[in-house]
Amino acid sequence: MTESYQPPVAEFPLLQQNPQLIYLDSAATCQVPAAVLNSFQHYFTSTHANVHRGSHRLGRAATDLLENARGIAAAFIKAPADDVAFASSTTAALNGLAQQLPVSWREGDEILLTDAEHHANILPWQRLAKQHRLVLRFIPVDPVSGGLGDWQQLINERTRLISVTLASNITGAIFPVAAVCALARQRDIPVIVDAAQAVGHTELDVTALDCDALVFSGHKAYGLPGVAVLYMNARWWRRMEPFVVGGGVVRQVTRHDAELVDSIQRFEAGTPNTAAISATVTALEWLQQQRAMGLTGYLQELRQQLVDGLQQRPWLQVLPAGANHTPVVSFYCPQVHAYDLAVWLDEQQVAVRAGHHCAQLLLQSWDLTAVVRVSLAAYTTAAQVQQVLQYLDEAWQMLGPTAE
Ligand code: PMP
């Protein structure tokens, strides 16, 4: 075990108030450290005002805070701050992108996704495909390795856009998105990266990736729900209509037209949730500090212990869990339904998720309907991992075919 890293459980008020809880659903949403909650509260007790409008000093302080947060979020993904907008969620950003991309679609144009996409990165493209008679193509996912199947073959002269997740929310597999971006760039095909599952576990570098857009939700990285960070390449956003229009983004309005500001703020019409944004960038800073203290290696070791333990139990089928994965592991038991296992674990105060995890395509392609997902985070301990394995043994005794 990485000696240097101590899981900072004491920093999580919810976990302190529920010492029996074993929270293993961090891929759905992370628990929030006190520093982040304090930042949220501090905003309201020190800086709360509307931004970009105030001629008073509190309004200016709120604006400065927001713009400072933009700089921190941009640095976190190695993007220029001028190319980073705050959105309300990954889902909202992907919907906005799908509707406003500066692409003149022609019937039969193709959009390339993977079978591992979260529904948030499928449904917006389905809607767009219906509007313009586009073709959606899906890169298969190998059932043994969990990696992408032959994606190069699926890029052709009709491919107009690629939108892919950096990591599967079911297996944790990290996909070779840099290679996808490199080939796409050669062929002048834009790439959108859904980094919602990657943000908590891998360093993000949009400059190295050379993608056209990248988005993640703050709540997947110890921040607050209601905030997403959306990077868009300037080549793109300067030619793109904002997803939402209204106050705060206007230079001049006449009765029938409006001239918008020409900065990235044009994508943030209305009053932003500055409190949640500021708390979320505190979370990103907190996460960077944890990484510097060894979080990534720690979680990889914990994940390996979990995978080893699950694989030692022959009644469980573990989905691909190879080397290059985030600490997210899914499994099922052919004889006991995933929901029954999850309910059993819940009775022991273990929070895991069972179901299709909003990634039905992946499970369908593997002929599965529901799996149990265990996802680890900074506050997970080795003892908790062993405890869960023991509870699974008990579940098998109680619910398996030899149960009385
Ligand atoms: N993409 C992936 C890969 C996800 O895991 C999630 C969250 N489950 C989303 C998109 C959607 O994120 P949100 O619900 O915050 O919009």
Image (spheres, helix red, strand yellow):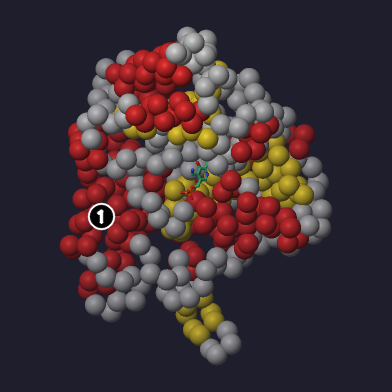
Please, what secondary structure does the residue beneath circle 1 have?
helix
Q: Is residue 350 above or below residue 49?
A: above
Residue at horizontal 82%, vertical 53%? 108
Give coordinates of residue 20: x percent, y percent: 24, 29
Taking the image as shown, residue 362 lies to the left or right of residue 385, namely: right
Identify the image quadrant of the N terminus: top left
Q: Quadrant of residue 12?
A: top left
Return the residue found at the far bottom: 255
The residue sitting at 35% across, 62% down in the picture is: 273
Q: How many marks?
A: 1
- Point out residue 5 in the picture as x, y percentages from the top left corner: 27, 24
Residue in view at x 55 percent, y 67 percent: 242
Q: Residue at x 47, y 80 (%)?
A: 251
Q: Please identify the quadrant where the C terminus is shown.
A: top left
Q: Residue under circle 1?
A: 40
Q: Position of residue 372 (x, y in %)?
A: 49, 28
Regarding residue 172, the answer to whether it shows in the image is no
- Asked whether 252 or 278 is in front, the reply is 278
Give the vertical position of 74 relative to 245 (above or below): above
The amino acid type, in three-letter code, at marker 1 is Phe
Using the image as rendered, state which of residue 55 and residue 309 is in the foreground. 309
Lateral position of residue 307 relative to residue 127, left or right: left
Q: Taking 57 as reference, is 182 above or below it?
A: above
Comparing 364 with 86, the one in front is 364
The answer to which image quadrant residue 43 occupies is bottom left
Crowding at mark 1 (Cα within 10 Å: few <14, some 14-19, many 20+): many
